[in-house]
Amino acid sequence: MAKFKDRQGRSLFGILFAVPNATAAVPTIIAVAVAASCISLYTSSQEGVANNLGLGTAGMLLYATLKLLHSLLEYVNSVLATDLVAKSYQNAVRVFYDEYSNLKYVDFMRIGVGAIQCSITRRSGALIKFLRILTLRFVINLIYLGVIVSRLALYISLATFAKAGGVLLAFFLALSLLQIRRARLRRLINDATNKNSQKLLDVLINYERVRSYCNEETELMKYRVAMDEMVYYRQIYEVLYVLIAYFTTVAFLMVFVTIYYSLNYHERISRIQLEEVIFTSFKMNNVVVSILQDMNSVYTSYFNFTASGIEDVQVEEAEADAAKFRLHRLTDRIDVINLNLHFGSSRVLKNVNCTIRRGEKIAVCGPSSAGKTVFLRTVLGLYPYRGAVIFDGYEQKQIQTSSLLANIGYISQETQIFDTTIMDNLKMGESSLSDEHVMKCCKLFRLHGLFKELGYDTPVGSLGNRLSGGQKQKLVFMRTLLKAAPLLLLDQATSALDIQTERFFLESLRIYLENVTVLASVKNVLVLPDFDRIFYFEEGRLAAEGSFDTLLSDSVDFSVFYKKSLSEMNKM
């Protein structure tokens, strides 16, 4: 396992130099910037001569030629830098997605989708800003400053140069510390922004519920409260920026006064040379101000790039996972031995022991909060546990995550639909399938007529909002079957369907997927007789297991649960 921030620190240069020809582009950008800076300073000084009508025809021709060359070099630099930034952005999005997708399920859910989405967007934007400023302004201005200082050194003594440099260095260090303190406020701003994004996402996802309860003003007030913290830190952040700008002006004035005083009272210098020094000093001021501003942007952008807000999170290293056993195809059975699971101090699974044989269709039932969903998700590998979950003789922790998940088709209680067409959603589990094969499978489960009527190429909308609850469950159910996994974990996958349709699907699983193992959390107790066995959970324990008839006659707890559930269904 590796710390999240360690991966971030390694990824900055990895992202940049993963761009094809980046090793050649970076030094080229620097070399072009050096040439452009020298030409720019020379042409600027010639402009002063031209104002005094001191340039002849040859001088004007040279000036025009150098001006054109300078523009050409800036254009070349801009093209190279823009291409480098654009391709780095593509690499960054891929790297960020990989980092967050490798989070442990518990950490992913704790952070929240809104915060993760905000973090990816912010970090990608920060990387673009960082590289743009670094390649298009900051490095160029640093080089330009070096050229200016070299030219200034021709006119002033070493002692004066040392005095001015000492004053500038002192202010530079002080302002750098202030910049660092200011940039560190970004962590607080980022945390507050993540909370705002999560709250906004909650409101948007629950739009129908908010409208139906007339809670618009209440939710808006909660959002405003969530923004207060962010606004407070942003105010401090911006005030510090103004303070930095003020001290930058003071720094230049002190350097300028130091040079001017030394030249007038301690050194002999001609009027023309003095004008040249003053002109060069003003140029230096503009460059120093720009560098200090860019320094803040560079540091802040880099901090935004690395500050995900989840530095304490552990991620699975690809190298460590690759060293584990690769489960090609689940062919035998699953053994669960002394399975225990804790959420904080709460024990949600307690010494669960069971065996799931190949091809069995097993129902998981029990009262609310009995541990049914947690049990399925633990088998899926989403939760850290104590005990053992053994697939074909290999403990889950010894199996490559990707190979384990390739053997499992999973449907959660929340139907997850992508904002694309019905056909694309159906192929999400196996994108290489042909349209004809998809339609053939849909016909077996009597869903072809529904999808044809809706239109296989019809967009389903955000979160499938153009489909009914039953239509979404049928789509997700069919998508999972098309994955052709040897193990299906169904968490109330058919709860929105009528009893006849639900029973038809279960019977179809038995007929067409004879060798596929099914572990299904069931809400409708009327379908329990259709399963080979039943796992009855109660307060985190596997209280009873067996066939429907066996449990009904031998297990008092199951019998009470079943009769109570039937009674509640009849009242509806």
Image: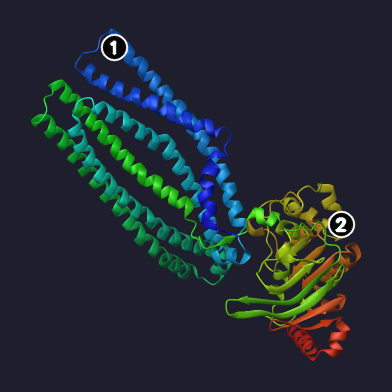
* Direction bottom: furthest residue: 556
| Image height of 160 relative to 175, above or below | above
Q: Judging from the image, what secondary structure is the residue with disc 1 in?
A: helix
Q: Amino acid at mark 1?
A: Gly
Residue with the mark numbered 2? 443
Please name the residue shown 66% across and 56% down the image: 320
| Dot 1 alpha-carbon crowd within 10 angstroms: few under 14, some 14 to 19, many 20 or more | some
What label sits on residue 59 in the rendered view? Answer: 1
Task: Pick whichever, 40 or 390, lies toward us.
Answer: 390
Residue 8 vs residue 282, the one in the foreground: 8
Identify whether 66 is placed above or below 299: above
Query: Residue 436 at x, y = what percent?
Result: 84, 48
| Relative image position of residue 271 (x, y in whole percent) | 13, 22
Q: Is residue 96 left or right of residue 322?
A: left
Where residue 415 appears, as percent x and y from the top left, is 69, 64
- The quadrant in which residue 442 appears is bottom right
Q: Residue at x 55, y 43 (%)?
A: 15
Badge 2 amino acid: Lys
Asked if residue 123 lies left or right of residue 513, the reply is: left
Asked if residue 303 shows in the view, the reply is yes
Quadrant in which residue 35 is drawn? top left
